[in-house]
Image: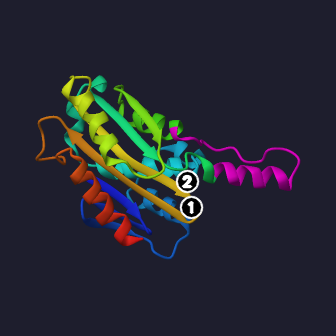
Amino acid sequence: MYCTIVKNVVYKNEVPVFENRDADLPAFLLSVYQHFELSYPKFYKMDNLSKLGWLASEVLLKNNAIKDYQPEEVGLILSNANASLDSDQKYIKTVSDIPSPALFVYTLPNIMTGEICIRNNFKGEDAFFIFEKFDPGFIESYVNNLLNNNILSACICGWVDVLGDDYKAVLFLVEKGKEENSIPLSKKNLDSIFENLIIDKV
């Protein structure tokens, strides 16, 4: 199972579940939040990167039996290329216009992973890696190590990145021994889904 958000469209697996093509990124993210009738006050404090990843996780896990796991059995392994550069640039512009800081948001990738874990009561391993581009081989190796060594029974993994108008999110749910509800974890599968659902739509 996977969720992709790109070019103002939200996909669950390959099915579009929401779109708002005329909105800029902040308005689009808010419209996703409202469409799925979510309720999480800290959403409004998050930067665009955190909102994007958090929303992708909400869509991915909607109506899913992942709650059957113990909190320590579920982990979160994400990556991107720009970390919080988008928010950093907005912050620098803000403080150059006025003498004191005027931008306070939940920013940095660890805020995103923290809020996803808090929301879903995940207490297993979580990490956020910075790569030049999506690295399915690393994700496969890292997550397989966690599953095969019984550190985790389920893991959300993938890519969440924002830089200006360019944003991409694809989150995969991997469950040990439950491939009917998740995707078989392999570099080929991850790469194929990422290329088909992200690159072709950009």
Q: Which residue is mark 1?
A: 26
Q: Position of residue 168 (x, y in %)?
A: 44, 59
Give the extent of the magenta segment.
87-109
Distance between mark 1 and mark 2 Cα atoms? 7 Å
Q: Nearer the viewer, residue 165 or 196?
A: 196
Locate residue 113 relative to residue 59 in the image: left or right. right
Q: What kind of colouring is applied to the model shown?
A: rainbow
The amino acid pointed to by label 2 is: Asn
Q: Which SS class for mark 1?
A: helix
Q: Residue at x 31, y 55 (%)?
A: 3
Q: Which residue is mark 2?
A: 48
**Residues at marks 1 and 2 touching, judged by CB atoms closer than 8 Å:** yes
Query: Magenta stretch: residue 183 in it?
Result: no
Q: How many discs appear?
A: 2
The amino acid pointed to by label 1 is: Pro
N-term mark: 1 or 2: 1
